[in-house]
Amino acid sequence: MSWVLGNWPQIWQYGIAHVLLSFPPVIAGFLISLPLGWLAARHRVTRGALLAAGGVLYAIPSLPLFVLLPSIIGTKILDPLNVEVALTIYAVALLLRTTADAFAAVDPGVRLSATAVGFGPWRRFLTVELPLAGPVLLAGVRVVSVSTVSLVSVGSVIGVNSLGFFFLDGYQRSFPTEVWVGIVGTVLIALVFDALLVLAGRLLMPWHARLRRARRRSRVPAGQQPALAEVLR
Amino acid sequence: MSVALDTVVTMIEFRQVTKRFPDGTVAVRELSLQIPPRQVTVFVGSSGSGKTTILRMINRMLDPSSGSILIDGTDISTRDPVALRRSIGYVMQDGGLLPHRTVVDNIATVPVLSGVPRRQARERARALMRTVGLDESLERRYPAQLSGGQQQRVGVARGLAAEPEILLMDEPFGAVDPVVRGELQRELLRLQSELAKTVVFVTHDIDEAFLLGAQVVLFRPGGVIAQRGTPQELLQAPADDFVAEFIDAGRPRSILR
């Protein structure tokens, strides 16, 4: 405990660095995978190609990717951008399938009816398909957020410091307390990120929580909504 | 129900319309048909009769493979599909409501799309809730929190919200139980006697067709008209065995009722 107090400034500094390194890849990955996932959901050919590409990308081990990226995108070896780009690639790879499934799961009847009453394609995407895909998208982003927060630690091996530094340093010095600080700190950040995402989901999709509660109470499958409504009244 | 006197004007006209789908099936063959204004025209037929396809060509959800469709004398292929759809009310089975929008926002959908300020559109939506017999306390509910009949009323209110001249109804009461369906049918007749829209109503239920239609168009498979006329004309003088059988198939149920 005294080690923690004594090194608090450094722990705090690396914790902040960890947070700052973690959220850009999550956001960039989400924004990139949205149009790709939508494409994959609309056309069978693109679906196969995109999901295959996503699988291959995710199979690349993280450490070699960190090391190789500078020669591919022309950054300096110690540039944090290497870690950001690598983690964005993983985020996209992880999210592609989720976004494709999320858009494919939007009720075709609702799409049809939105078109019938006069939604143009863009408006329909932004105000109908995107919110209705929202709950599944959120589930995907939560997974990616946790995975990114933990992968950021690996960046410490190539000198991009984060809480991962304490794993390495503690391991080399055979000093478990320091390793524990790294682990607990990383888990805390992951939990905070996850809580923020859940909160954002509640605020952006108030209808979803209400419907889920209603469904749980009535134990009626989601498809049979008229029957569910009878139970509710 | 009042039949408008100036039926000389044709609101919607099909001229030799054929619809062939990419897989080769011909859903509608050489259809020529006039739909008079301010009354209910019902398309009736079994599944595969092309009735829904014909309905969806009116607001350019589908475009004909050949032939043309005119609204008030203007070929609709010259009109922007999205603007055209906003000018025509559309009600479908299960209401086709947006599950993530409240009742009042669902009803206000089309005016908001057309640029009416949200507050004003909601105000009008509340008035429409009264018109279609929905309690105002339901306005903040989501569609899944309503009964099937209530959802259908919301669907009708949404169809009317932009004050369209034309209202397309695609088997709107198909998914509700017979008692509620009866209520909704009477309600539609009451509304129509006040609003006098040009309504095109699709159903496979001949009783519903006879109850609601000033003009009934009975289709045989492949989108060919078997007979068109008033319910009396179809009942008293069925054009052929197909028509007679289709009408007969509905009879025993109506005797029991």
Image (tube, rainbow, N blue to C red):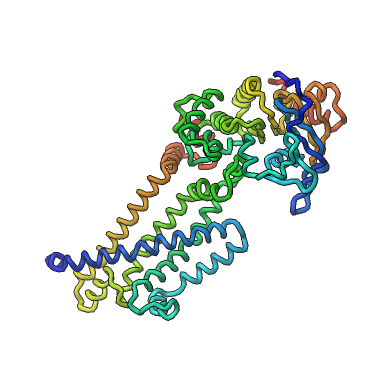
Q: Is residue A163 above or below residue B226?
A: below
Q: Is residue A229 left or right of residue B174?
A: left
Rendered-image quadrant of the N terminus of chain A: bottom left
Q: State the image coordinates of residue B26 (x, y, percent, origin top left).
A: 79, 47
The residue closer to the viewer here, B15 or B90, is B15
The extreme top residue here reads B2
Q: Is residue B88 left or right of residue B143?
A: right
Q: Is residue B21 left or right of residue A10?
A: right
Which residue is pictured at 79% across the width and 26% down the height? B8
**How many labels, in total?**
0
Q: State the image coordinates of residue B58 (x, y, percent, origin top left).
A: 71, 39
Give the quarter of the image for residue B230.
top right
Q: State the image coordinates of residue A223 (x, y, percent, origin top left).
A: 54, 42
The residue closer to the viewer here, A215 or A125, is A125
The residue closer to the viewer here, A86 or B44, is A86
Q: Is residue B206 above or below residue A57?
A: above
Give the quarter of the image for residue B175.
top right
Is residue B148 visible in the rendered structure shown here?
no
Q: State the image coordinates of residue B158 (x, y, percent, origin top left).
A: 56, 33
Which residue is pictured at 80% across the width and 35% down the height? B33
Is residue B158 visible in the rendered structure shown here?
yes
Which residue is pictured at 73% across the width and 31% down the height? B11
The extreme bottom residue here reads A71
Which residue is pictured at 62% across the width and 26% down the height? B181
Give the quarter of the image for residue B28.
top right
Q: Is residue B79 left or right of residue A100?
A: right
Q: Is residue B82 above or below residue A41?
A: above
